[in-house]
Image: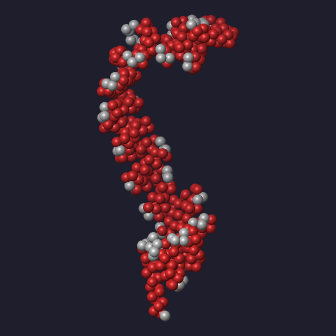
């Protein structure tokens, strides 16, 4: 009783505040006067209650509208509110009172089936749903029957109805339901994947279908399937996350050629591409990319790397123009960033090519202040003294080098041998 009082007060307040404007409108349109003069006000009130979640009150108002106007849309809205309020038995009773055993009104029949399912009266729901789908041939009704069979754990029959719905319109949401039943409930994993793959090849691999395939392939640890699907997914959605997964799979497969091609095309991770160029000794590409990264970021580390790769990628290591370019870049780096690697590389370059040996030794000594026990830095220093013909100093330093990790490097061995020859030659002369 209290519920109806609240409804009455709500409607009364809406009527009052709508004032004469609403009445005036009705009077002015007397030629097409509504059967129920307060229809608009009741609609607004019912919708407002529905928005508030007061489904019982909203249903009551829509029921009044139906009885006053005989418009079926109000009846449907009233019953939907009953379902939202879990008044399932009430829905069944109301539909039965209107339809009895007649199922010509598909919408009412669907609502009764939904109420039966919610009340766990699955056998009755199944019986009615099968009758409905035989008459309506509607995709929605195929889905409704299949859902009931799923609840009854009759998965083969559920699949049959889903297949019937899918053939009618090739709807990917229906396909997804089919795939889940095949993969999860019937353990027909290959069939589930085949269904999705066939659809994707014919109709395209949407984000939804590709994502489902990713889940299945990942669960089966199917790396090739996973890679193929991610590549298709990336062609739809150029997401950095998807691109990184593709790169990870190439890395797992150790397919660095394909990884490089994908990184070059996608430009998703230039720093990783730079590492790949370094590992594959693609120094010319590495130098160009490092320079681009420097321009983009202003990070001197990339300028230093560009210089080193420019030298390493040069076919003529004695090219003086190349030396000038590399030395200029490295000087710009070490003036701001006192990094041992770049100080040593610059120093060694000046020493080895005899551009300025003494200045080169100074750069190497600065590097040794940062890493005093580096075999490579000490080797550069020894080589500098060798170039100055100070073989005793060079030999003394080289003895330290040969005790450190890295002394087995071929270049270090070559330097050690030449320093020993230098000492022998000096002794012979003396």
Relative side of 1 to 22, left or right? left
Where residue 281 appears, as percent x and y from the top left, is: 44, 64
Is residue 326 among what the camera can see? no
| Front one among 344 and 286 | 344
Q: Is residue 37 above or below residue 321?
A: above
- Quadrant of the image occupied by residue 333: bottom right
Q: Is residue 245 above or below residue 122?
A: below
Corner quadrant of residue 153:
top left
Q: Viewed as shown, does residue 72 lie left or right of 104? A: right
Q: Residue furthest bottom?
A: 430
Between 154 and 106, the one lying in front of the other is: 154
Above or below: residue 357 compared with residue 73: below
Q: Residue 169, percent across and down?
A: 38, 28
Number of numbered discs: 0
Q: Residue at x 58, y 62 (%)?
A: 300
Q: How is the image coloured?
A: secondary structure
* Residue 421 position in % (x across, y down): 44, 85
Question: Which of 120/282 is in front?
Answer: 120
Q: Quadrant location of the N terminus?
A: top right
Q: Is residue 95 above or below residue 151?
A: above
Write the residue at 51% across / 7% down: 70
The residue at 47%/67% (across/down) is 313
Q: Position of residue 367 (x, y in %)?
A: 56, 70
Q: Residue furthest right?
A: 20
Q: What residue is at 62 percent from the left and 12 percent from the top?
A: 10
Asked if residue 224 shows in the view, the reply is yes
């Amino acid at each position: 009783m209290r519920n109806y009082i609240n409804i009455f007060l709500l409607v009364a307040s809406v009527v009052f505040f709508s004032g004469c404007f609403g009445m005036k409108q009705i009077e002015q349109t007397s030629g097409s006067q509504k059967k129920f003069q307060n229809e608009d006000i009741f609609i607004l009130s019912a919708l407002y209650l529905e928005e508030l979640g007061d489904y019982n009150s909203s249903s009551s108002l829509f029921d009044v509208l139906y009885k006053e106007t005989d418009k079926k849309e109000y009846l449907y809205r009233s019953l939907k509110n009953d379902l939202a309020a879990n008044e399932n038995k009430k829905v069944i009773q109301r539909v039965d009172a209107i339809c009895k055993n007649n199922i010509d009104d598909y919408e009412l029949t669907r609502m009764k089936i939904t109420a039966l399912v919610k009340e766990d009266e699955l056998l009755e729901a199944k019986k009615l749903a099968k009758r409905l789908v035989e008459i309506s041939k509607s995709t929605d009704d195929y889905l409704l029957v299949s859902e009931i069979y799923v609840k009854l754990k009759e998965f083969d029959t559920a699949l049959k109805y889903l297949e019937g719905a899918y053939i009618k319109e090739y709807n990917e949401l229906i396909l997804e339901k089919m795939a889940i039943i095949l993969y999860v409930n019937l353990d027909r994993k290959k069939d589930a994947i085949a269904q999705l793959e066939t659809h994707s090849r014919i109709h395209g691999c949407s984000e939804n279908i590709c994502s489902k395939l990713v889940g299945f392939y990942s669960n089966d640890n199917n790396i090739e399937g996973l890679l193929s699907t991610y590549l298709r997914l990336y062609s739809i959605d150029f997401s950095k996350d998807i691109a990184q997964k593709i790169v990870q799979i190439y890395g797992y497969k150790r397919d660095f050629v394909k990884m490089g091609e994908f990184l070059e095309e996608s430009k998703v991770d230039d720093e990783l591409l730079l590492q790949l160029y370094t590992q594959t000794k693609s120094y010319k590409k590495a130098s160009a990319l490092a320079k681009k990264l420097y321009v983009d970021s202003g990070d001197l580390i990339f300028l230093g790397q560009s210089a080193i790769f420019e030298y390493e990628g040069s076919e003529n290591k004695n090219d003086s123009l190349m030396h000038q370019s590399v030395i200029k870049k490295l000087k710009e780096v070490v003036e701001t960033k006192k990094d041992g690697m770049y100080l040593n590389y610059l120093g060694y370059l000046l020493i080895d090519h005899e551009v300025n040996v003494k200045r080169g030794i100074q750069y190497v000594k600065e590097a040794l202040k940062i890493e005093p026990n580096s075999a490579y830095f000490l080797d550069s220093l020894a080589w500098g003294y060798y170039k100055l013909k100070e073989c005793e100093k060079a030999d003394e330093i080289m003895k330290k080098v040969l005790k450190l990790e890295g002394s087995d490097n071929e270049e270090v061995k070559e330097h050690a041998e030449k320093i020993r020859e230098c000492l022998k030659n000096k002794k012979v002369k003396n």
